[in-house]
Image (cartoon, helix red, strand yellow):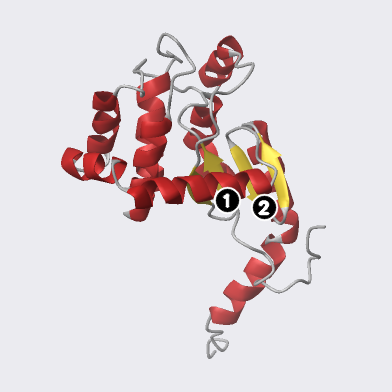
């Protein structure tokens, strides 16, 4: 159950946005999560494997309706996104998860680049100032793989079966539309406590002298 409006801020945990570069719908969420979510979400890359039942035409219509770049998926979608998700995991360790995931998803589904090709992964990394040598080294590091595997396992344990997905207040919201549902829940249960916390940090000035 979600917390009540009187819950402490410690109980109103930061929401998590799970994204998989191999899931085309992740692009739609990555393009609007920063604007839609009333609370800053933590972006976490996961590797869920190939998505099922992807409707690229429906995604293209949604992208067009939102004024995004035309959807242009690479041939052979879904592609193997393991290297891209490993690179995203490395990017997260440097504080560049949002920048890399946006760049990679745009490369794949607006630029039509297959991110199973290592060169295209490196291009996405360069777009957020990750040096190719650093990315290549991270891809070969067992620590990077373990981190991605652990994040994916935790996401699955929380009910995530596809990306994008938001986990907020103990509930899992899947798909691009899930952002709206998660945001609505956070506004109801998270907003009141955030306003109280903010008010406690403000200095109350006395009335001006007449």
Residue 197 in picture, x, y percent from top left: 61, 74
- Whether residue 107 sits left or right of residue 130 in the image: it is right
Inter-mark Cα distance, 2 to 1:
7 Å
- Secondary structure under tag 2 reads strand
- The answer to whether 207 is drawn above or below residue 102 in the figure is below
- Whether residue 192 sits left or right of residue 30 in the image: it is right
Q: Is residue 37 visible?
A: no
Furthest toward the front, the residue is 142
Label 1: how many Cα within 10 Å (few below 14, some 14–19, many 20+):
some
Residue 164 in picture, x, y percent from top left: 58, 35
Residue 36 in picture, x, y percent from top left: 58, 43
Residue 105 in picture, x, y percent from top left: 41, 29
Q: Could you say which is closer to the camera, residue 207 or residue 164?
A: 164
- The answer to whether 179 is drawn above or below residue 1 in the figure is above
Q: Could you say which is closer to the camera, residue 195 or residue 74?
A: 74
Label 2: how many Cα within 10 Å (few below 14, some 14–19, many 20+):
many
Query: Quarter of the image holding residue 181?
Result: top right
Residue at the spot 62% in from the left edge and 20% down from the top edge: 52
Q: In what quadrant of the picture does the N terminus appear?
A: bottom right
Q: In what quadrant of the picture does the C terminus appear?
A: bottom right
- Secondary structure under tag 1 reads strand
* Labelled disc at residue 103: none
Residue linked to disc 2: 168
Marks 2 and 1 close (CB-CB < 8 Å): yes
- Whether residue 197 sits left or right of residue 105 in the image: it is right
Question: How many numbered marks appear?
Answer: 2
Residue at the spot 50% in from the left edge and 34% down from the top edge: 20
Q: Is residue 140 visible?
A: yes
- Whether residue 88 sits left or right of residue 150 in the image: it is left
- The answer to whether 53 is drawn above or below residue 122 in the figure is above
Residue linked to disc 1: 16
Please report whichever mark, 2 or 1, sits nearer to the chain's N-terminal start: 1
């Amino acid at each position: 159950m979600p917390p009540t409006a009187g819950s402490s801020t410690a109980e109103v945990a930061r929401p998590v946005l799970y994204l998989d570069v191999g899931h085309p719908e992740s692009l739609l969420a990555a393009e609007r999560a920063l604007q839609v979510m009333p609370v800053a979400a933590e972006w976490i890359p996961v590797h869920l494997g190939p998505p099922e039942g992807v409707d690229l035409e429906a995604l293209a219509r949604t992208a067009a309706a939102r004024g995004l770049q035309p959807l242009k998926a690479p041939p052979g979608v879904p592609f193997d996104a393991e290297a891209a998700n490993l690179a995203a995991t490395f990017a997260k360790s440097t504080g560049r998860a949002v920048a890399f995931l946006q760049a990679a998803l745009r490369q794949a589904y607006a630029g039509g680049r297959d991110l199973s090709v290592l060169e295209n992964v490196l291009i996405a990394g360069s777009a957020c100032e990750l040096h190719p040598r650093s990315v290549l080294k991270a891809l070969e590091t067992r620590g990077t793989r373990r981190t991605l595997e652990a994040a994916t396992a935790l996401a699955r344990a929380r009910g995530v079966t596809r990306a994008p997905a938001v986990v907020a207040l103990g509930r899992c919201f899947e798909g691009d539309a899930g952002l709206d549902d998660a945001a609505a829940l956070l506004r109801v249960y998270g907003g009141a406590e955030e306003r109280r916390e903010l008010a406690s940090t403000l200095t109350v000035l006395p009335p001006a002298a007449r």
